[in-house]
Image (cartoon, rainbow, N blue to C red):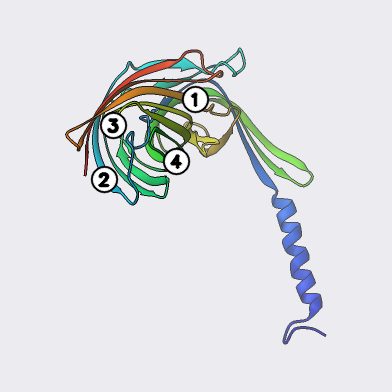
Amino acid sequence: MGLPGIKISSIWRVAILLGLSALLYGCSGKHANIKNGSFDVNLPKPFWGPGIFLYQNEFHIRGSLSYSIEDEETSSIDDASTETDIKYDFLKNPLSGSVDIFYKMNRFDFGGRLAVEPYPSITLFVGLNDLYGEVGAGFRLGYSKDKASYSGHYIYESCTFVGCIDKEEGDFQESQRSYNNANFEVFVFSSIFVTDVLSVNFSTGLYQPWLFRRSLYFENVDNSEDYILSISFPFIFSQYAGVSLFLLEHIQLNVGESVYGSPSLSKWHWQTNISASYLF
């Protein structure tokens, strides 16, 4: 029994033709071996939670202005082959602003942050806030516009089910190309409440500055397309330690030191953070 107006044999013919077309068309292989490259990295500012004891059912909004002291520097990616020179360019972004929301229910507090540092990001967290301290975890998702320069060797192959019928290869070089990037961080944080107004804060994170980026665009080649990379962008570990002082029931001052690095990178990047906040 067939479908109304259509014979089963016709359906099979169409299916076979589509299948043969797909096999004959095959796919194109686009691979890039980067030999030299530099990639911008915008580092996230540390997150340490409320930094104070919160009472049951308390809801707060905290506005903050932050200033960071750091140098612009580069760090080579050491896990690349010895024939390459690929590095992260850590950028200096001294000023940032954020708005935090905190709410405590039972012994747990949760909330989030909207920040501009200098590009927008959103942070969500949950913590256990007690009389003597706090411990929690969260994640941060951000946007950044980053520049990259890179050069190396590319291979472009047009293939079918019987093999690759066309192959093109050569050298490429791109300078200061801008990319719209997503970046992502997961972190844990803790605070020790020394007194009602003084706390010691810690935060440890794992940051990926070039999230989802598995290919790059080559403009100055015959087949101008995105090419699959031969490298993976390494994660960056962050560690923060600081102190927070709460004054006049609304003002919160914080100073601390952050360090960023990875076993895959040749050096560690240091950042001094100073912030002033108002708690509503």
From the image, state whether disc 2 or disc 3 is nearer to you. 3
29 up-or-down from 244: above or below: below
- In the rendered structure, find residue 237 and report the number of the disc placed on it: 1
Q: Residues within 10 Å of mark 2 (few under 14, many from 20)?
A: some
Alpha carbon distance from label 3 to label 4: 17 Å
Q: Earlier in the sequence, mark 2 or mark 4?
A: 2
- In the rendered structure, find residue 196 and report the number of the disc placed on it: 3
Q: Quadrant of the image for the C terminus?
A: top left
Alpha carbon distance from label 4 to label 1: 23 Å
Q: Amino acid at mark 2?
A: Ile
**Residue tagged 2:** 61
Q: Earlier in the sequence, mark 3 or mark 4?
A: 4
**Residue tagged 4:** 128
Alpha carbon distance from label 3 to label 1: 31 Å
The image quarter in which residue 202 lies: top left
The image quarter in which residue 71 lies: top left
Q: Earlier in the sequence, mark 4 or mark 1?
A: 4
Instruction: Report if the CB atoms under discs 2 and 4 are less than 8 Å apart.
Output: no
Does residue 94 appear in the picture of this structure? no
Q: Amino acid at mark 4?
A: Leu
Alpha carbon distance from label 2 to label 4: 18 Å
